[in-house]
Image (cartoon, rainbow, N blue to C red):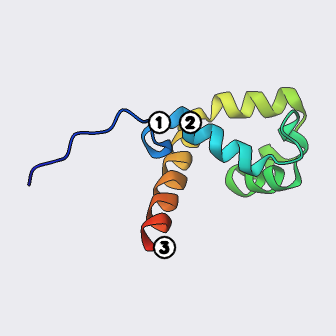
Amino acid sequence: MIQKPRKSVIRFCDSPMLNALRYYWITAKGYRLRPWKSPYIQWRLETFYGKEAANLDAEKFFDLMWRERARMRRFLAWVAERRHDQKRKH
């Protein structure tokens, strides 16, 4: 099967950085300058990382994000894949 050449436009699913920014922009609504205070992000992190993600302040939040960046990268790839699948169905 012959593949079509890719367009020069960057799609979110092709760029991990843009995918991460898109996910952050959606989930941090109302808390974009202080994501560690977002109830949704707190719940998501506690569900994903357990007790170590409870009661985060800025320092602990960024430490956790840096330390677990490989897991976050895989999670964000999964999010992009789900979004792509969802767009195909509609």
Residue at 69%, 33% (x, y): give it: 65
Q: What is the crowding at mark 2: few (fewer than 14 residues within 10 Å), some, or many (at least 20)?
A: some
The answer to whether marks 1 and 2 mark residues whose Cβ atoms lie closer than 8 Å is: yes
Left or right: residue 50 compared with residue 31:
left
Q: Position of residue 14 (x, y in %)?
A: 42, 40
Q: Which mark is residue 18?
A: 2
- Camera-nearest label, 3 or 2: 3
Q: Which mark is residue 90?
A: 3
As shown in the figure, which amino acid type bears the numbered disc 3? His
- Residue name at image x 56 percent, y 42 percent: 19
Q: Amino acid at mark 2?
A: Leu
Image quadrant occupied by the N terminus: bottom left
Task: For marks 1 and 2, give the CA distance.
Answer: 5 Å
Q: CA distance from mark 3 to mark 2?
A: 22 Å
Compared with residue 86, is residue 45 higher up or lower down, i.e. above or below? above
- Mark 1 lies on a secondary structure that is loop
* Residue found 50% across the figure and 67% down from its top: 86
Alpha carbons under labels 3 and 1: distance apart: 22 Å
Task: Please state which of residues 2 and 41 is positioned toward the viewer in this rendering.
Answer: 2
The residue drawn where x is 42% and y is 36% is 9
Three-letter amino acid code of the residue under disc 1? Ser
Q: Quadrant of residue 57?
A: top right
Mark 1 neighbour density, 10 Å: few (under 14) some (14–19) many (20 or more): few
**Sequence order check, earlier mark of 3 and 2:** 2
Q: Is residue 38 left or right of residue 23?
A: right
* Residue 15 numbered mark, or none: 1
